[in-house]
Image (tube, grey):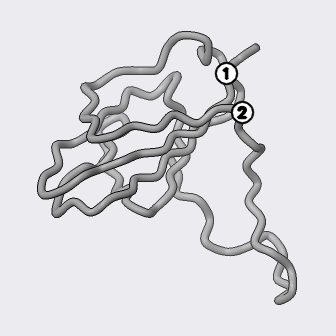
Amino acid sequence: CQQLPSTPESTAPDQPRQRQRQPSSHCAINANAEFTPHVDSGRGLGQSAKSLIVGLGEYDRGGELCVEGDSFNVRYRPLEFDGWNERHWTLPFSGGQRFSLVWFTPDQ
């Protein structure tokens, strides 16, 4: 897993921030979900691009994404990971609502 770079590709001050990520064709919206360890399956199996997740909401603690045993705070912090090959899950959370958005492009 890698955190998205925090610096733009271009250093010109009038240029918008750009990422090296290709656009995704799908976005999954999850509400208050706590997923058990899994790898993704279905139509997206074999996709060439990594998934991108970000957590949203007002919850007190927890809710990190674990990928292959490493935990990542994704609350308002986007993270790219290979959900089709890397085992991942959600840690329990409490004290409010937690949403996550996951962008991906299924193999056609």
CA neighbours of label 2 inside 10 A, class few (<14), some (14 to 19), many (20+): few
Left or right: where 72 falls relative to 6: left
Q: Residue at x 35, y 53 (%)?
A: 72
- For residue 73, which quarter of the picture? bottom left
User: Farthest residue toward the bottom?
Assistant: 13
Left or right: where 94 falls relative to 83: left
Q: Residue at x 76, y 14 (%)?
A: 108
Name the residue that disc number 1 marks. Answer: 106
Q: Position of residue 34 (x, y in %)?
A: 24, 35
Nearest the viewer among 27 and 88 is 27
- For residue 58, which quarter of the picture? bottom left
Q: Residue at x 65, y 16 (%)?
A: 46
Name the residue that disc number 2 marks. Answer: 25
Left or right: where 73 falls relative to 95: right
- Mark 2 / mark 1, whichever is N-terminal: 2
User: Farthest residue toward the left?
Assistant: 95
Q: Is residue 93 above or below residue 14?
A: above
Nearest the viewer among 55 and 45 is 55
